[in-house]
Image (cartoon, helix red, strand yellow):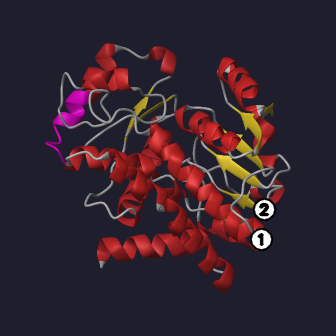
Amino acid sequence: GCRLYPYASFDAALFDVLRLSRGMSHKNAVAGLPHGGGKGVIIADPSQKTEAMFEAFGEAVNNLGGDYITAEDVNTTCDDALIMLRKTNHICGLPQNSGDPSPFTARGVWQGIKATAKVALGSDNLNGISIAVQGMGKVGYDLCRLLHNDGAKLYIANRSNKAILDKAAAEFGATIVPTEEILFQECDIVSPNAMGAILNPNTIPNLKCKAVAGGANNQILDDASGLALKARGIFYAPDFVINGGGVINAAAEVDGPYNEAAVIEKVDNIYNSIEHILSESKQTGEPEGVIATRYAESLIYG
């Protein structure tokens, strides 16, 4: 995908895109896709979008000759993808094909949350389960709809766009929480669906949940943070496993012929993957991220 974000510096953007591309490699491997992993970022605020910006990005993608295939991501849309299409054919998630992959990402996260609840709480029935959802973008909003339909009690926060928060609160009966407090909301499950590196030495000691399961990439800052989370007895659904639904859908479009029913079946299998990883972690005491990374790299490197 192509992420557009107002990074504080070039180095901050580089740090994020390298972590994201590594995560995509792991994500594609675990999902059983015949692709490597890559990511692109544009340093800008969404208010600064121009057609020239996306044409330039399309040219950069085209210069790679198909080694990198892009799609929508944070702050980019199907309309932006159509502008990129003027300069490159190496793009998926187009409205005339399978469209925005984010609903499939949300579906996979929903399945992963149910599996997480089964292992961490004893049942995958989400009725009455309290879930704090950080980020009300395309994935977060669709996820809230699915969780609400299952009877979950929702707490929500978003860095900007108060209108979407108000809409979600009305539609899903959700409670709005300040952005700086959502991770520390007392609840059963915290679901990060915004930016990465939010599970770190500053945040982990203050978590008041039994599990973390969300669609954001690279939620854990580093291995030490993964160990700290495990030491607190908090279950963690590895992000590159639980959020694989979007790339599963995108790969189906690229590899063709596109079959939505087959995509949904594969996305729903995320439930089994998360249940297996969390169960192994519960039995062995090894951090979930370590288990998932070892499995992904065994597939990549043999």
Give percent across and percent down for residue 262.
Answer: 34, 53
Q: Which label's residue is closer to the chain start, 2 or 1? A: 2
On residue 233, which mark appears? 1
Distance between mark 2 and mark 1 Cα atoms: 7 Å
Q: Quadrant of the N terminus?
A: top left
Determine which residue is flagged by label 2. 210
Residue 65 among those drawn in magenta: yes
Relative vertical location of residue 84 with respect to residue 209 in this rendering, above or below: above
Residue at the farthest bottom position: 284
Residue closer to the observer: 19 or 273? 273
Q: Indicate the amino acid at tag 1.
A: Gly
At numbered mark 1, what does the secondary structure look like: helix, strand or loop?
loop
Q: Position of residue 106 (x, y in %)?
A: 53, 44
Residue 77 in the figure: left or right of residue 66: right
Q: Is residue 49 above or below residue 120?
A: above
Q: For the point 20% across and 47% down, which residue is it?
A: 256
Crowd rating for badge 2 (residues with CA inside 10 Å; few <14, some 14–19, many 20+): some
Q: Is residue 28 visible?
A: yes
Quarter of the image for residue 27 reads bottom left
Residue 254: quarter of image: top left
| Residue at 50% in and 15% down | 47
Measured as percent of width and height from the top left, residue 279 is found at: 63, 77
Mark sitting on residue 47? none
State the residue in front, 71 or 41: 71
SS class, disc 2? loop
Residues shaded magenta: 58-68
Hey, what amino acid is under mark 2?
Lys
**Which of 99/50 is in front?**
99
Q: Residue at 36%, 26% (x, y): give it.
A: 78
Quarter holding the C terminus is bottom left
Count the numbered circles shown: 2
